[in-house]
Amino acid sequence: MADVDVRMTVNGVARRSTVPPRLTLADHLRSTCGLTGTHLGCEHGACGACTILVDGDAVRACLMFAVQADDTEITTIEGIADRDGRLSVVQEAFREHHGLQCGFCTPGFVVSVTAFLRDNPDPSDQEIREALSGNLCRCTGYQGIFAAVRAAADALRATDADAGAAARDGSHP
C-alpha cells in the first residue's frame, strides 16, 4: 500500500508528512515529529500513557493511525504548558501534590485530566476516581494524583471566578 500525505496541526505548528497507512499516530508523533512525551506502554489502549488531544478530545494515540489524524488539531504533553514554558494548572498541581514518581504515565494523566477538567470543572470525588480509571500508574498508589486533580479543579474554578469578577467590575485579572 502506498504512503499517504497527511496534514495536521501539532501543538500549534502546521505539519505535513508522508506516512505509511498503518503507522500509529503515537509512532508518528514520536518518530516523525520528535515529540517523545507521548509514551507507549501497552500499545492496545488500556494504560493511557499515550493519551493526547485530537480536536480537543482525549484519544489514545496508539489506537489511531496517523492517516486518521489528517486535518486535525493535536495537542501532546509538550503543548500543554504555556508558550512561555510556564506549567499549566494541571501540571503545576501534579508537581505540587507529588502526582508522579517515575514519570512514565504522567504525560497521559496530565493530558487526560486537562480534558476532564475542561469538560467537568467541578467534579465530585467519585467523578475524579472514574476519570483516573482510564490511566494506569505502577508507582504512585494514586493518592498524589487524586490530590493533584482535586487541587487543579479548585485552582481552575478560582481562576474562573476571579476572571468573572474582573469582567463584571471592569478590571483586569
Image: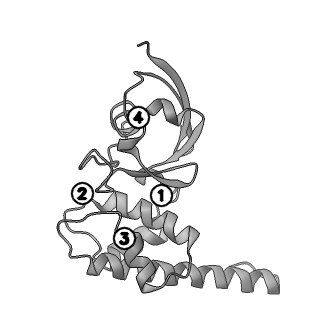
| Lower sequence index among marks 1 and 3 | 1
Above or below: residue 44 compared with residue 125:
above
Seen from the viewer's position, the closer of residues 44 and 160 is: 44
In what quadrant of the picture does the C terminus appear?
A: bottom right
Q: Position of residue 64 (x, y in %)?
A: 42, 39
Circle 3 Cα neighbour tier, 10 Å, few/some/many (<14 / 14–19 / ≥20): many
Q: Which residue is mark 1?
A: 80
Q: CA distance from mark 4 to mark 1?
A: 16 Å
Secondary structure beneath dot 1 equals: loop
Seen from the viewer's position, the closer of residues 46 and 49 is: 46
Seen from the viewer's position, the closer of residues 98 and 134 is: 134
Q: CA distance from mark 4 to mark 2?
A: 19 Å
Secondary structure beneath dot 4 equals: loop
Q: Kindly indicate whether the residue at mark 3 contacts the one at mark 1 (C-beta within 8 angstroms).
A: no
Q: Which residue is mark 2?
A: 104
Q: Residue furthest top?
A: 2
Circle 2 Cα neighbour tier, 10 Å, few/some/many (<14 / 14–19 / ≥20): some
Q: Residue at x 27, y 46 (%)?
A: 40
Circle 4 Cα neighbour tier, 10 Å, few/some/many (<14 / 14–19 / ≥20): few
Determine whether, in the image, residue 161 is placed left or right of residue 94.
Answer: right
Q: Quadrant of residue 32?
A: top left
| Lower sequence index among marks 2 and 3 | 2
Q: Which residue is mark 4?
A: 33
Q: Residue at x 37, y 77 (%)?
A: 129
Q: CA distance from mark 4 to mark 3?
A: 28 Å
Q: Residue at x 45, y 79 (%)?
A: 127
| Lower sequence index among marks 4 and 1 | 4
Three-letter amino acid code of the residue under disc 4: Cys
Q: Nearer the viewer, mark 4 or mark 3?
A: 3
Q: Which residue is mark 3?
A: 132
Q: Nearer the viewer, mark 2 or mark 3?
A: 3
Q: Nearer the viewer, mark 1 or mark 2?
A: 2
